[in-house]
Image (spheres, grey):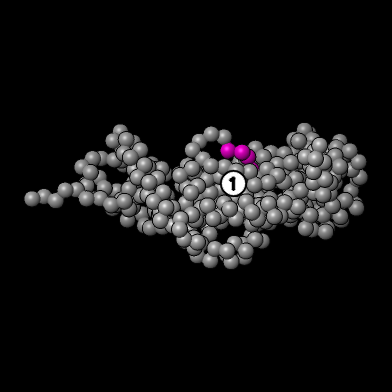
Amino acid sequence: MNNPPQFTWDDLQFFLAVARTGQLSTAARQLRTSHATVSRRIDRLEFALKVKLFERNPRGYVLTAMGTRFVETAEKMEQETERLRADLAAGSMTQRGVVRLSAPEGFANFFFASVLPKFAALHPHLSLELVTIQQIMSLSRKEADLSVVLDEPKGGPYFFEKLTDYHLQVYGSRDYLAKSSPVTCRDDLLDHPFIGYIEEMIFAPGLDYLGDVHPRIKPRFQSSSIFAQLTATRNGLGLCVLPYFFASRYPELVRVLPDEVDLCRGYWVTCHGDLKQAPRVRAVIEFLRETVKGEDARFIPPLAAAMHAGRKAG
């Protein structure tokens, strides 16, 4: 007698990784295994089910009609498995596992990195992967467990929560400002070289702020890295819009037109709705929420904070 076809939940994880990425190599990186292992698991699953799930072509793996139908079933099983894991772990105070967090470079390097010792002390059994190349990460393809983002998420099966506002102002180095023409109004900014993002590489509307300072500003030096922009500003290359929470750390930087130019943006934490209750993910969300709340004075200049408090009191 022939044994009935057998496949495991692991096979479905391999199937979903390939279905979401269309590439064996990308799926292999996500699953931390080899290209050959992914291929072998897909072949085994198709043999067990007696159906063809993918069409193979030089550009990658494309779902067949049956494969597309099977995605829905596999995702339901994935969701139930995650919920079961959450239920099993709910009674334990010790969170375990790996969490991949995607965050903007400024937030990651100038805020979150500074509180990592506190996170490690609270969650010694959690391993954290911090990714700052945010424009290549996708929550929908499960490339990150959760993200800190610059703009409020719109639609989709996601949980999201605002962490904090943060303020940006124009900065220049003391040496640069001492030898340059004075800035007494916004039009004077046009006499100075500006530092900013490469326009076509701005991955979030929240970063497109030079036009809010003055519509005719054209940056002379551009970089996709806020750290490179900061370094260029400290070295006297020109003026730059920088977040208060890290520019204020450098005594050689001076705010330009602080009473006139003050931009407000926000940070949000978001994850796929299916992952919100996973203990490892929930632990990171709660840590972010409480830590940012306790450090809110770092994100908002004193004058702006006083005005905000006055509006709330009114």
Q: Position of residue 131 (x, y in %)?
A: 56, 54
Front in this rendered view, residue 58 or 257: 257
If the image is split into quadrants, where does the C terminus sit?
A: top right
Q: What span is colored magenta in the figure? A: 149-153
Q: Position of residue 148 (x, y in %)?
A: 60, 48
How would you rate the neighbour count of disc 1 (Cα within 10 Å): few for under 14, some for 14-19, many for 20 or more?
A: many
Question: Position of 182 compared to 71: left or right?
Answer: right
Which quarter of the figure has residue 249?
bottom right
Question: Is most of the magenta stretch helix, strand or loop?
Answer: loop
Front in this rendered view, residue 134 or 276: 276
Residue of label 1: 269
Residue at image position (86%, 36%) is: 187
Front in this rendered view, residue 73 or 258: 73
Q: Amino acid at mark 1?
A: Val
Spot the residue most to the left.
1
Residue at image position (91%, 45%) is: 181
Q: Is residue 161 visible?
A: yes
Residue 138 sits inside the magenta stretch: no
Residue at image position (60%, 43%) is: 161
Q: Position of residue 231 (x, y in %)?
A: 74, 56
Residue 151 sits inside the magenta stretch: yes
44, above or below 210, in the image: below
Q: Position of residue 253 (x, y in %)?
A: 82, 54
Question: Position of 35 compared to 133: left or right?
Answer: left
